[in-house]
Amino acid sequence: MATTLPPPKPELLSLPERRQNGHSGGGQNLVPAGGDLRVTQHYSPPASSSAIWVAIAAICMSFAAFTSALIVRQGSSNDWRHITLPSVLFLSTLLLLASSVTLEVARRRVAAYMGGATADIAPSRLWMYLTLGLGLLFVAGQYAAWLQLRSQGLYLATNPNSSFFYVFTAIHAVHVLGGLAGLLRVIRKLGNASLRRSTLDATAYYWHFMGVLWVYLFLLLWLKI
Amino acid sequence: MGKLLAVTIIIIAIASAVPFVMHTWEPPADVSTHGGLIDEQMADTMIEAGVSFLAAQILLGLFIWQFSKPRTDSKVKTFPGGAKGLVIAAIVLVGVEVLALGAFGSKAWAAVYFTPPAADAMPVQVQAGQFAFYFRYPGPDGKFGPLHPEMINEGNQNLFGLDPEHDVESRDDVVTAEMAIPVNKEVHLLMHAKDVSHSFYVPALRIHQDFVPGLDLSLHFTATKVGTYEIVCSQLCGLGHYNMRAYLKVLSQQDFDEWMKKEQAAQ
Amino acid sequence: MHETAAPAVVHGPPTTFLSKHVFSLDHKVIGLQYYTLALVAVVTGMVLSWLMRIHLGWSSAAIPGLQVLSPNGAPGGVMTPEYYLQLMTMHATIMVFFVLTTAPFAAFGNYFLPIQVGAEDMPFPHFNMMSFWTTFTAFLILVAAFFVPDGPPLSGWTAYAPLSAIGKNAGPGEGTGQVLWAAALGVFCIGQLLGSLNFISTVLDMRTKGMTLARLPVTCWAWFITSCMGLTAFAVLMPATILLILDHVAGTSFFIASGLVLNDQLVPHSGGSTLLWQHLFWFFGHPEVYIAIVPGMGIVTHVLVTNMRRPMLSMKAILYSMWALAFLSYMVYGHHMFVSGMNPFSSLVFSFPTLMITIPSTVVVLIWIGSLYGSKLRINTASLFALGFISMFVSGGVSGFFLAQPSIDIMLHATYFVVGHFHMVMGVAAMFGIFSGTYFWFPKMTGHMMNETIGKIHFWLTFVGTYCIFMPFHYLGWAGNVRRYAAFTDDFLKPLIPVHQFITVAAIFTGAVQLLFIYNLIYSRFRGPAAPANPWEGTSLEWAMPSPPPWNNFGGHDPIVYHDADQYGVKTASGADYIMQNSPEQALGTAEGD
């Protein structure tokens, strides 16, 4: 019977107090609007830094399901015709990878500002906008790839490989658009100095994950396994 | 009210077991060579499941009876042996026994699925479509003609999509709406789905296999008793699912030969 | 440090009707919204089951008014076989997704998880609100299938391809209805993924001071485990529904094989894999069953431990067993496909982990029963339903011994034995968990006590009634009665029709009894006596706040937790036999006798 009680830990016996930052149960959603970034950066539940990994795990699971569907579908029939990937995809892959680099630069700059190492926030915003632009160009590149395929007469239902190509690129693009929305939100919060450090980090991890995921999908479609 | 619950649980448990013990509702009697193993496995599992079911429900009832009485003393007691004993009981009594049961049961499964059909097994093809089974015998040449799904036409009774004009093997194929097989002769059943998933379920023969569109499977079995049995569809296939059935006639070799002659003449 | 402006609360007290009751960010309101949705869904699902049961008992009977709902499906009120299948599909889909997933997991979880960990709210209240409203949208999309010309799909909740993928030629409702069905499930997945994300983050990051993982109440663990399952399972169902929709509307062939012929016409698809759908669906489908039952196990443990006035023999054993169930649920899905054309060797491989499920299930049941020994069991409606849950869980569980074995599955696959099994264990048992949770937490959620007399009558009639419905299902299946038949025209099934008629009468009776529950909910909500903060003398944090709790739960103060939630049957200075989690008081000893 679990009734032998451990002695109370001394650090737990202090009076209840409301902590404005750090890790506790209540009051975590208190975020000053229009305050100072250097102060507000920690006004955050660390929840988003673990939640982003949970979200990434769920997305991995979905694409694992898609991948297994591709493998089963490819193996179940002899109607699989390998398609040649549109050349624009190589360019858009580079764009997406470059956007990860620019975002990382932006994140470092914001961190430096928050840490007091630099007094100028403007360059980090510029890098953010650059990331946003590259992300938009990537989505435009995917659209161009679709147009290129269509001009070859390869539509969604033409053959199983083209079906999977359109499905993978479209679902990935939807997730990238979500990432772009996240970037916009970060830029807005940077503007009114209500950005939490964990929000920035979570958005950056998500964006890098989009890059990794795209490289995976690209190889999956390109390698013709 | 606790006592009432205890009594109710025990009565329900015993009453639930009665029809199984009395064999009130039974599957149709087995007429196959492999079915004995399945029946044995079902009976063994019934004993194991029945004992576990009654033991758990009765124990639950007894403890509710005993410990729902309002008591004035503040004492609570702990089950002798505590959690460890119960966990060990769960692993040893139930876990090991059930796993052993499963291990023995794989024999019955292997008898159906891991043995190749005998070389002289009689091939019969069955095609399932909304909402009927059709059967095809290879005829004297012992070969099935190839299928041409695009030629299927129920109007002119080309149910399988055969092309006797071009395919020599198709010319003597015999297509029937009921299945007849000789008794004590192994049958090699080739399963083909015309449209959606169906299932080939003959309770009396202890066979049950889904039709997979795009994937032709096969089964083999031997019927041991002359009679007529029902083949039913057990995989939801559309609005006529409940009514999708065919009859399986198990005939003596002589009756089967006559039946075959009649069917050949009717082609 | 810079001076900061006064903190602006992202999620402050609601000010308008809309922000308070409709687009609320408050996890408690969202929990109640989920509960209401589940209630609407369960009534819908139950009425559908009545209609189906009447048709199964008396297949030529006219059901007055049914022709109004569907002139084609029930001309003159007599159900057609296809309409039976359509109602069956909707009954199952509504029950599995919008009742058994939403009520014990999303509804109670939303309401009590943040409270029990001592948080003010979930970390992402906007996601939480979106989670409910996407789920609600999914429900509307699903119900819309009733009102499209061909009606809802008839392919069952499992929607096996290619029947579900070919389109309207495959049967009534297989066109628009099936697409709506798949879209509803896809949208539902989004809602549950958002919810699971919130639940997991709440447990990991929102625990109050002193609330270590080991001190979490068992319900929190149950919801956490369920979220982990939901996150992975719904993430697989969603791709499957997307591919299914594309097969319908875009002409792709993911699930439709070559050479299929409908109405003498070659289906214009080729090369798809029939079994691919089944693999994707059941990879989701088996964990889904546990998503329905694990929260119930948590609720029942929580209710029992409060009413037994002693701790469980081993809460750890229960927790590890729930984890084991969750883990095994991903390794066993193939047992739904023993005779589906999967490699017969795989059937044996799937069979053993399936049989291993008996071990954690038996551990949990024995710990429950063993903990009753020597307890001071209090009988109230909540504990009655919790005890009923154990009985149902055992009854539904032992039939798993049969279905886990491929050789026996040859006889019992797709029969009423399976229907009895899953209705007992994931239907009725899970419902008992929901009832138990409702009677237990209603005072907290509304501030009013529920009427115990009506509650007890409700329990007795439901307990006996559900056994009368679902036990005979096993007898039918044992005799080979195939499921999903609109009528029984086979020679070997005709003698079983009287059993079906008995079940129908029992189902209508038991269904009608549930009106008592709904009456009790409404009556007690307005007329019930005021509830104290801690009516059941519980220890977890939901009892450390007023009934109903204020919008910010603990009134702006973080509770501090000193104990686990199992401090029952202890000696204290005040004479109470329990210590609340947030009380610094230490037990003077156990109240254990001889």
Image (tube, helix red, strand yellow):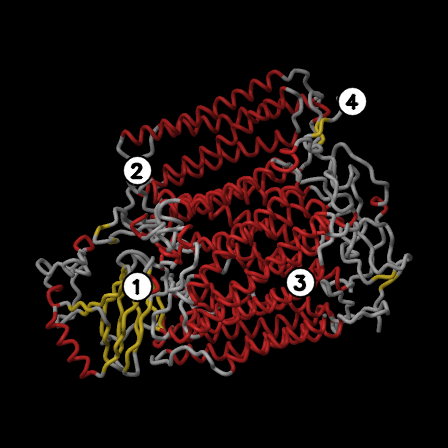
Q: Position of residue C360 (x, y in %)?
A: 61, 64
> What's the residue type where badge 2 is placed?
Ile
Q: Position of residue C433 (x, y in %)?
A: 63, 59
Residue A83 is labelled as 2
Q: Which residue is mark 3?
A: C386
Q: Position of residue C245 (x, y in %)?
A: 38, 44
Residue A159 shown left or right of residue C186 in the figure? left
Q: Which label sits in the foreground, 1 or 3?
A: 3
Chain containing mark 1: B
Residue A146 in view here: yes
> What's the residue type where badge 4 is placed?
Met
Locate the N terminus of chain C by quadrant: top right
10 Å crowding of disc 4: few (<14), some (14-19), many (20+):
few
Tell if the residue under mark 1 belongs to the same chain as the one under mark 3: no
Chain containing mark 4: C
Q: Which residue is mark 4?
A: C1
Disc on the earlier residue, 4 or 3: 4
Residue B217 is labelled as 1
